[in-house]
Amino acid sequence: MPFPILSAIIFTPIITGLLILLIPGERKTEIRVTALAASFIALALSTWVYFSYNTDIGGYQFMEKYDWFPQLGISYFVGVDGMSTPLMVLTGIVMFTGVLISWGIDDRPREFFAFLFILASGVFGVFAALDLFGLIFFYEIAVFPMYLLIAIWGWKVTREYAAMKLTLYLFIGSVIALVGILAMYFSSDLGTFNMLELENANFSPEFQKFWFPFVFFGFAVLGGIFPFHNWSPDGHVAAPTAVSMFHAGVLMKLGAFAALRVGIMLLPEGARFHLPWIIILTLVNVVYGAFIAMVQSDFKYVIGFSSVSHMGLVLMGFATLNGDGMLGAGVQMFSHGIMTALFFAVVGVIYDRAHTREIPKLGGFARLMPLVAVAFVVGGLVSMGMPGFSGFVAEFPIFMGLWRYQPWIAIVASISIVITASYIIRVIGRVFFGKMPEEFVGHFGDATVLDKVALVLLSAILIVVGVYPTVMVTMVESGVENIMRLLGGA
Amino acid sequence: MEFILDYLLTLILFTPILVAVVVALLPSEEVKLQRWVAFLGSLIPLALSIILWVAFDPNEPGFQFQEQYVWYPPINSSYHVGVDGISLTMVVLTTFLTPLAILASYNIKDRVKAYMFFFLMLEMGMLGVFLSLDLLVFFLFWELGLVPMYFLINQWGSETGEREIWGRKIKARTYASFKFMIYTMAGSLGLLLATQLIGVVAGTFDMPVLFEEMGNLEGTLMGFPASTVKTVAFWAFVIAFAIKVPVWPFHTWLPDAHTEAPTAGSMILAGVLLKLGAYGFLRLVLPLYPAESKFYAGALAFLATMAIIFGALASYGQRDFKRLVAYSSVNHMGFVILGIAAAAFAINSDSATLALNGAVLQMFNHGLSAAGMFFLVGVIYERTHTRDLDEYGGLFPLIPVYGGILIFVSMASLGLPSMGGFISEFLVVRGAWPIFTLFTILSMIGLFFTGAYILKGIKQVLHGPLNERWKGHLSEINVREAFIITPLMVLMLLIGVWPSVLLDVINRAVMMFYSLY
């Protein structure tokens, strides 16, 4: 039997999380080092999976299957394809850099890392799951710790409100999705939750048309689809830095990914019927999100709404239902995950020092911390879709998909590019350049070495994917082929 | 040597960014070292492009020194580079001006490392546009050049000056850089959308393939008639390039950006960056949309004439020396566009070939004279800390060498016979005359105003009563500065008296490139 590498990736964080709880709470250094080591293992293993995945063969690889509740047709069944492999690496990277950035957390780091790692296991599990029950199971594991992480370690002003809002939104969403999943289970006559079998269940078109919105919206809430997006900026802002990174970087992809895997891939006929109007909602995401980001004065809200805008592009790519759009959406999930993790890391570094996030009160940080400024500029260029950076590699095919599907949507959506450029330039200009306010001068120094390692790693990935897209697009393309086969066969 | 010749274009394209990385890794305190590494490093692309010039065979049709590697497989985009006579001229201009501009930046004292990094990155962006033969890669470099230019203006631009925007006072350089960025990004948005559209309908971004296939697109595309789709894409390209050139009335970002940019930034902005737009017309618009170009050539010629006349008048009306030179760019680039418009109307006629020759040569000449003019403005500004023409006056006796150089370069800019500008403007006018007679006549009246503003500049700075406050405070042009301006002057004169050194290459390229489409 080959080494169960996916299981190793999925369970490393949660086991470490439980082990960390055994370390006495005051031995903070040991706790941090253990956390860092575990996240490094998860990153190394997921990177290994990424580079040993065979794109020529495609399909699901590294599969593992064990019976769980055989009577109900539930099994522990995991495997990755071209769509999910980049997301596994993304999770590994965000986890590793998240630990580096949270090194300074002094309030109960033991519990913090434990919850964070339980969350990480849930995320890995969803990306690898090939069994619907397993998917929902891991999905709930990923969502629940969020409540505690925000409510306990979050920003004091809004943390209870934001944590509650976020949890209720996501909980309701997942319940609705679960109803749809159960409907699939009962009407398929296969008696299984195995997604590979359900793909060929041939649900009747009426069934698909009725149940598709349940499943799709249930998950897409976590992807931040308009009008169910407004839990997300509040949640981002209230969460501590590493949690924001996870939240925007990985968790929102979880929603989009599950909406794709369960909604579009299992109910293709329903997708074909409903997505033409859903794409209008995603268009609102993209354009309206960018405009809202432009008028925010809180640094973190700017980034929060930019995530709404960029996740809209992901869902929009899915909604085109053609190969280009899907390809772009797949790359965009990865690219946006890294970019937004970078953004929130930068915001965290600045907030830790200035204790304010009001953009008009900040200024002149470039001289103090040049590397942080460079990292933010790189993220900003990705965000505005500058060629040579990963955002362009992702957005270009999405727009090509839109041209194929509905040219006017491409034209309207492109407004967001200019708006994004203008708010990114504004933030760069106000926060990093200009004059530093008197009360900050001389009060704090450059970012720590660990922060720098995290920022350099994140920016380097954004540039590598932008300059040499082949490293990722062939992988995603092989995943898209499978999706297109399902869509074509329906 | 074998290796160099095989990968010549890639080497030219990426040496600047390598040098930039080296500069970035130098210790922060070693300012001198950073300057010299940047300068000597920028001589490598120049040396390589001289090799390119020598090894290039003007008689061979098509693109030479081609290299092609897969870049983005799912959408069929490849890293494809190659040169013909038109792009070769521009590559040489770029690699020639960049070391001079870096040398002109030795007075920058603030964050030299970052400055040099952006400057070399800018060089790569510009070279990439001239070299790429893939539409997507073309767009990549087109946009990439914006970033360093934005930061050069925003961070190292002029310290003084304020502008009011939305009721808030901000620094003039912040205003100018923001305007530059948003203007050009909005312009290239259309280019981006049209590039995507072409990718969707043609299934490839490879230029040589597209040149052949665009003409065959007929019937309906995505529910619209092919001609409608092509017209929309044509205008998207035209607007993007027109903003960059800039063609009147899209020029308003230019005076601000030029005035606020640091001296070397203005040199490159006027010397090379404006050429990107004109190059876009030559390389993409004419061969991809011959029918549309012909149909709308009259409108383009009209805009070019307006640019020539209004550019000259606006220039004459300025009190700020740098703004005067900035508007002169609008005026001179108008001739490039006039030549292109005339050629678009009657492609492959003798007159069209003459006009295109003139346009390409004018791009080169304006690159030299505009860079020279901006540099000379920078020299005087550094000594007087004012650009107000009314505050100079009678400086000739104080700084005779500088005065002589200023007159020489001004005359080159004016298009005095025996200088390069004369040859190229004459060719444009001669080519455009039989095609757009009225516009050509109006443009030649515009030339009269060109003389007026050039003479105004000379008079206000050098002649008239001496402004006493400069007495004893003004130093003569120094060796480094003379070293920068000399090569420019030599080339201006060389092209003026022996134009065929460039025209041979340009003429063959123009005839071979456009006869295919």
Image (tube, coloured by chain):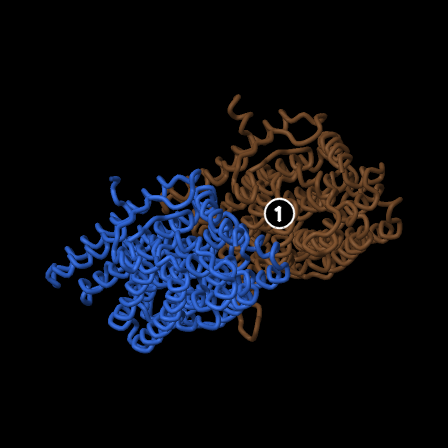
Q: Position of residue A299 (x, y in %)?
A: 41, 68
In the shown orientation, is residue B59 left or right of residue A249?
right
Q: What is the quadrant of residue A472 in the picture?
A: top left
> Which one of the lettered chains is coloured blue?
A
Left or right position of B429 against B461: right
Q: Is residue B390 visible?
A: yes
Instruction: Identify which amino acid the numbered label 1 is placed on.
Output: Gly
Q: Secondary structure at mark 1?
A: helix
Residue drawn 81% across and 51% down?
Answer: B295
**Above or below A140: residue A395:** above
The quadrant where residue B306 appears: bottom right
Q: Is residue B471 above or below residue A184?
A: above
Quadrant housing the C terminus of chain B: top right
Residue at the top extreme of this rendering: B2
Q: Position of residue B311 (x, y in %)?
A: 74, 56
Asked whether A362 or B156 is in front, the reply is A362
Question: The residue marked by circle 1 belongs to what chain?
Answer: B
**Chain ID, brown in image:** B
**Residue at label 1?**
B199
Q: Residue B246: in sight, yes or no?
A: no
Left or right: B511 as drawn, with respect to A15: right
Q: Nearer the viewer, residue B345 or A478?
A: A478
Identify the residue at the far left of this view.
A24
| Picture coordinates of residue B254, whole percent (x, y) | 64, 57
